[in-house]
Amino acid sequence: MSTLISFDDQHTGKKPQEVLKAYFGYDSFRPMQEEIIELVIDNKDALVIMPTGGGKSICYQIPALVKKGIGIIISPLISLMRDQVEGLKQNGIAAAYINSSQTSHEQQKIERACAYGDIKLLYVSPEKLATDWFLSFLRTLEINLFAIDEAHCISFWGHDFRPEYKQLGLLKNKFPNIPVIALTATADKLTRKDIVEQLNIQTAKQFISSFDRPNLQLMVQPGRDRLGQIVQYLKSHQTESGIIYCLSRKSTESLAQKLRDKGYKAAHYHAKLPPKKRAAVQDAFLRDDLQIVCATIAFGMGIDKSNVRFVLHYNLPKNIESYYQEIGRAGRDGLSSDAILFYTYADVNTHRTIIEDEASDIKNVKITKLLRLQQFAETNTCRRKVLLNYFGEKLDQNCGSCDVCQNPRKTFDGTIIAQKVMSAVARCREKAAMGTIVYVLRGRVNNQIVAQGFNKIKTFGKGKDFKEQEWFDFITQLLNLGYLEIAYDQHNALKLTEHSRKVLFEGEKVKLVQPVDRQAAVPKIRKKTKKEMFEDGLFERLRVLRKQIAIAVELAPYQIFNDKTLRAMTQTLPINEKEFIEISGVGVHKLTEYGQAFIEAIINFVAEEGGKIKGGTKIVTYHYHLQGLKPEIIADRRQVTLSTIYNHFAGLLTRGIEIDVSEIIPAEEYQDIANMIKKHGLDSKLRDLYAALGEQYDYGIIQLVLNWLQLEHDKTVK
């Protein structure tokens, strides 16, 4: 390492928990985050599979902050780097990026800042990182970790393979003592294996979080009259942001125009648009100037927007990984969001034709993965179960929120059917694909079956009581339920799982479903409570304020505060800095920059609504107090007793609101009451003080002075 480098390690040595609260505003880590952070701090490699919105970035950002040196993050897209760096800066963290969008002078300026220790996190593209010059530059820095984001891009088996990622394996060779943390939201078993091999981190500990996104409502609807269904949906989501994925460039343009004709702020996005046009659409969407983007998959990993409330698929994606990645762009802030797929068999055929025309060595793999998505779309079982089982995660209970669960199918005991399928898979030595297994069960003979000797196994012909299509349906259900899996790298052979062995040998029962006519899911709408209506109104007020601030500081609104943080404000109604910083997502930097504006907005809104919410009436009194009104005038204006107003002030003091009691109570009255409290003690009962003061003072004013003196005493003790 160069001895010329002097780092400004203002974060170094702090505990991860302290950094989490101070810079990110969160009180506790999400599942697995803390263990991953500690591992990387201990200079060990890690592979992290965590869903979008699950908190992957925290896993490398905090270690980079608490360790001496600088963290290098490899990120695939310029727009993604920019948004993440801006977000870090808003949290008071020194971060920067180097990519082709900058001039050489701008890059040199950042390089000097890195050398002087003024940057703690540096984002670069894989192309930039692999250049000889940049690798030489990295050798002059005290690097504390390498983080590889969207790590599935390195895998040939991944759904978004990028050749430029292949060269990242050199990191471990050139920097063997620096920990590498690879992260992605989507990677099946085969892709995970490929990632660690390609990056030369075979000993990396693997952290596989739940793939479940409970806040996403999964729905599949028939593809007829898609425009009509979309417009109907948008009527109840007028102010919310969303993405509509289309298969072709032409359909993105056509759909966006049709939505604009109906009054919606919509634009199209695809790879053939000029770079400036693409950037303008993305920026407008990120800044909430644009409600809807109709896009091809070109509108992908660069979307770091937390308040996307819906992702609609106008057409079928090409596989489950792509589908999962794309719906993951909704609800990153954890709030309820919708994922609606419009399904037609014509889309399956279109994708199949595209694959057949490709010059690819893995056409069969792609077709099989397409069919798995088709099976997901056609399933009669809980969609969340199907999705999670695809990634090797078993959900014991139905989710209760997808369209299938909302419109339950009839089930029957399918244990014998399952056992026949599993027996056939086992007796075919787990080397046969789905079609072969169906032929075996039906007793059909072909050259492959004879060559493998499958026509001589015990299960051959034991399934003649069901048609071929029925057996395909049953096997699909077993795949969706996690009793079978497909080995894509072994000619799509069906494999038994630990769950299937329980059925074969431990007496576990299997419930299958009877097919039903498909119908569009009808969302259940209930009338909102007064509390929910109040919170929605305040949320909209805070959303407008957030937008105004974002315009002033040239940021995307969600980078000020995300929707989840705004919702927390509407529920807890913080009216001072002490309460405001307790809100999840509020750190010290954001409290200083924006806290007062949001506090004032909350107080004013509650006052306008007359305080008709729990805790609201005290806030209204505080609102008038801030305007300089005396208690008597406040009581008259609010048409309540003076005692009630004093009780409000007493309650506000208990909440930690700073109020100068000398401005509220005449000096002589205050002194008289205070002397009596000091004489009898702070633990005196209110009625005893009332009697000792000759019953000449209201209970409310006595309580107010008592609370004030208690707070002053507590400050002295501290």
Image: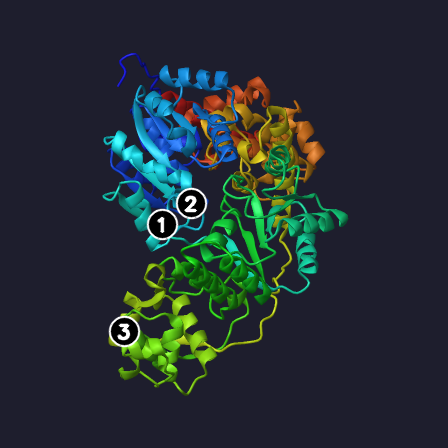
Q: Is residue 381 above or below residue 709?
A: below
Q: Position of residue 428 (x, y in %)?
A: 28, 74
Residue at mark 3: 426
For the C terminus, the image quarter is: top left
Give, as a three-letter code, the residue at label 3.
Answer: Ala
- At x 72%, y 46%, the residue is 264
Give, as a three-letter code, the residue at label 1.
Answer: Ser
Q: Which of the pair 282/353 is nearer the observer?
A: 353
Q: Position of residue 493 (x, y in %)?
A: 34, 67
For the N terminus, the image quarter is: top left
Q: Is residue 308 left or right of residue 116?
A: right
Q: Residues within 10 Å of mark 1 (few under 14, many from 20)?
A: some
> Upstream in the sequence, badge 2 or badge 3?
2
Q: Position of residue 615 (x, y in %)?
A: 56, 40
Q: Given contact means CB atoms under 8 Å apart, are the residues at marks 2 and 1 in contact?
A: yes
Residue 507 visible somewhere in the drawing: no
Judged from the image, the secondary structure of the residue bearing numbered disc 3 is helix
Give, as a three-letter code, the residue at label 2.
Answer: Gly
Q: Residues within 10 Å of mark 2 (few under 14, many from 20)?
A: many
Tell me, for residue 1, which label it has, or none: none
Distance (Cα) linking label 2 and label 3 = 37 Å
Residue 213 visible somewhere in the drawing: yes
Tell me, for residue 54, which label it has, or none: 2
Judged from the image, the secondary structure of the residue bearing numbered disc 1 is loop
Residue at mark 1: 209
Q: Is residue 384 above or below residue 51?
A: below
